[in-house]
Image (cartoon, grey):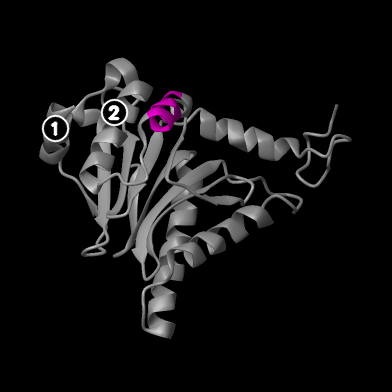
Amino acid sequence: MGYDRAITIFSPEGRLYQVEYAFEAVKRGMTALGVKSREGVVLAVEKRSTFPLVEGTEKIKRVDEHIGLAFAGLFGDARVLIDQARIYAQSHRIIYGEPIPVELLVKRICDIKQAYTQHGGVRPFGVSFLFAGVDRLGPHLIQTDPGGTYLHCKARAVGSGAQRALEVFTEEYRDDISLEEATLLALKALRAAMEKEFKAENIEMARISVEDKVFRLLSREEVESYIEKL
């Protein structure tokens, strides 16, 4: 009783309730997922508007030429952190003359998230990211959570339909999966998460390959062509 009123107070069980509430905000967000292969990484998100006269907002963002992300949770929180990620990426290019390593960028964003779990007068960021990128170490798919933790993943989903998508990944993911197969697997998992709303206009996808190291969004026509292959 009362332990959830301040971010700096631990409960007797060692829990920070405000951080746990931020996790709940992520669980209520629209589904976002990613799949990594040796050839690259693919991201896919559920993109729907809750109001008929409002166009769906973009849930996949490009951070730098070689890094992009998808998110689930509060859009305003995501926007602030994405802007900061872009500043970090461009500053690294200017100072060092090379693209920022994917894990370094993720760590810096998680440092911000973690700081907002231990100061009075603030609240945690209610958003989880799936970073997809390629650097000199190869392809990366990294998830961040509201507490500032990050995890390297082979396949991952966050948001309201995450559990159904993860069941598909657990059953069908292979270590030798190709980028094309990863794209189809991402759509199959998203179909399980979205159920009746699974349509090309409600889906946003992006890919990055090891070959060109360029993060790009797929057009609706490309998404429709992959859906036809399912």
Q: Residues within 10 Å of mark 1 (few under 14, many from 20)?
A: some
Q: Is mark 1 on a helix, strand or loop?
A: helix
- Horizontal and vertical percent position of residue 227: 17, 29
166 or 205: nearer the viewer: 166
> Which label number is shown at residue 79?
none
Q: Residues within 10 Å of mark 2 (few under 14, many from 20)?
A: some
User: Which quadrant does the C terminus fall into?
Assistant: top left
* Residue tagged 1: 224
In the rendered image, is residue 55 in sight?
A: no
- Horizontal and vertical percent position of residue 161: 43, 25
The segment highlighted magenta reads 164-171
Instruction: Please tell me which residue is depicted at 68% across the width and 40% down the height of the picture.
Output: 19
54 or 218: nearer the viewer: 218
Task: Answer with the quarter of the image where residue 66 lies.
Answer: bottom left
Outermost residue on the right side: it is 12
Q: Which of marks 1 and 2 is in front?
A: 2
Q: Which amino acid does label 2 sit on?
A: Lys
In the rendered image, is residue 144 in sight?
A: yes
User: What predominant SS class does the magenta segment belong to?
Assistant: helix
Is 127 on the left-hand or right-hand side of 49?
A: right
Instruction: Please tell me which residue is depicted at 44% across the width and 26% down the height of the picture.
Output: 167
Q: What residue type is labelled 1?
A: Glu
> Which label number is shown at residue 188?
2
When the figure is inspected, residue 102 is found, relative to residue 22, above or below; the finding is below
Is 117 on the left-hand or right-hand side of 34?
A: right
Q: Earlier in the sequence, mark 1 or mark 2?
A: 2
